[in-house]
Amino acid sequence: MNVTKAEMIITAGLSSQFPVHDMPEIAFAGKSNVGKSSLLNAMLNRKALARTSSQPGKTQTINFYNVQDTYMFVDLPGYGYAKVSKTDRERWGKLIEGYLEKREQLKKIILLIDIRHEVGNNDKMMYDWIKHYHNEVIVVATKMDKIKRSQVQKHLSMIRKGLNLMPEDKLVGFSSETKQGKEELWKIIEEIQEM
Ligand code: GTP
Ligand code: MG
C-alpha cells in the first residue's frame, strides 16, 4: 500500500477511550524495546509519528493510527519491562487483555521478536494467547540489520522453534532501518480485504 495519509487518533489508557469506527484493526505486540513503534513508522513512511525511544517502556498506552482511512494500526505497550511497578503492570494487563479479547474489529495481531534474542517466556505466553483467541499469528523478527546476512536464516529458525510455530504461522524478517520486509508485511496485512 502506498501510504500518503496516516494520523494518530487517540492514545488510550482506558478501554472506554478506544475509538469507534469500522475499519479493520491491526495490532502490534511484543516486548518493550523490540521495535513496535519504529516498525509502525517504517510501514507508514513516517519518521516519528509513533514515538520511539532507546529506553524501554516508551509506549504505555494503546495508540490508534488511522492509515489511509483503510486500516487502524494499533501500537500496544510493550511487556517485560522490569522497571514497572506492580500497579502499572496490572493496569497494563487489564488494558491489553480487554483489548485483545474483546475488540471485534481486531483482524490481525503481529507479534514482534528481536531477531538477536532468544524467545522469552512472555513471548511464548503472548503467542499462545493470540493463537487461542485469533488462530492466526504473524511473527515479525525485528532489527534484522543488526545481524550478518549469513546468520538470518539460523536466527529465523531459532524463533520458529522457540515459539513452536505452526506451519501456517507467518514469519517475516524486518528492519526499520533498511525497510527490509516492509513489502512482505504489507502484502500479509492487505490479505484482510480478501477475507
Ligand atoms: P516500547 O514502546 O518501549 O514498548 O518499545 P518499542 O517496541 O515501541 O520500540 P521502539 O520502536 O521505540 O524501538 C526501540 C529502540 O530500538 C529504538 O532505539 C529504535 O531506534 C531501535 N530500533 C527499532 N527498530 C530497529 C531496527 O529495525 N534496527 C535497528 N538497528 N534499531 C531499531
Ligand atoms: Mg513503542
Image (spheres, helix red, strand yellow):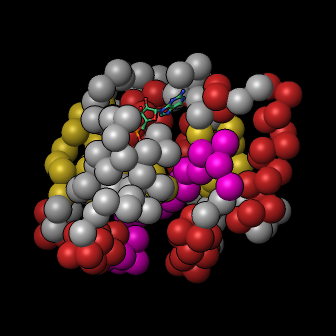
Magenta stretch: includes residue 192: no
Q: Which residue is at a point 79% across and 53% down the rendered structure image?
A: 158
Q: Is residue 114 visible?
A: yes
- Decide which of 126, 71 is in the foreground and name it: 126
Where in the image, quadrant-wise, is ligand 1 located? top left
Part of the protein shown in magenta: 97-118
- Above or below, 128 against 163 in this view is below
**Picture coordinates of residue 19 (x, y %)?**
19, 58
**Picture coordinates of residue 101 (x, y %)?**
40, 77
Q: Horizontal placement of 136 versus 153: left or right?
A: left
Q: Which residue is at a point 79% across and 25% down the rendered structure image?
A: 149
Q: Which residue is at a point 58% across and 19% down the rendered structure image?
A: 178
- Decide which of 59, 82 is in the foreground and name it: 82
- Above or below, 69 against 97 in this view is above
- Decide which of 1, 62 is in the foreground and name it: 62
Magenta stretch: includes residue 107: yes
Quarter of the image with the C terminus in it: bottom right
Q: Which residue is at a point 59% across and 29% down the rendered structure image?
A: 175
Q: Is residue 170 visible?
A: no
Q: Horizontal placement of 35 versus 50: left or right?
A: right
**Picture coordinates of residue 44 (x, y %)?**
41, 29
* Residue 141 quadrant: top right
**Picture coordinates of residue 122 (x, y %)?**
53, 68
The number of callouts visible is 0
* Residue 92 quadrant: bottom left
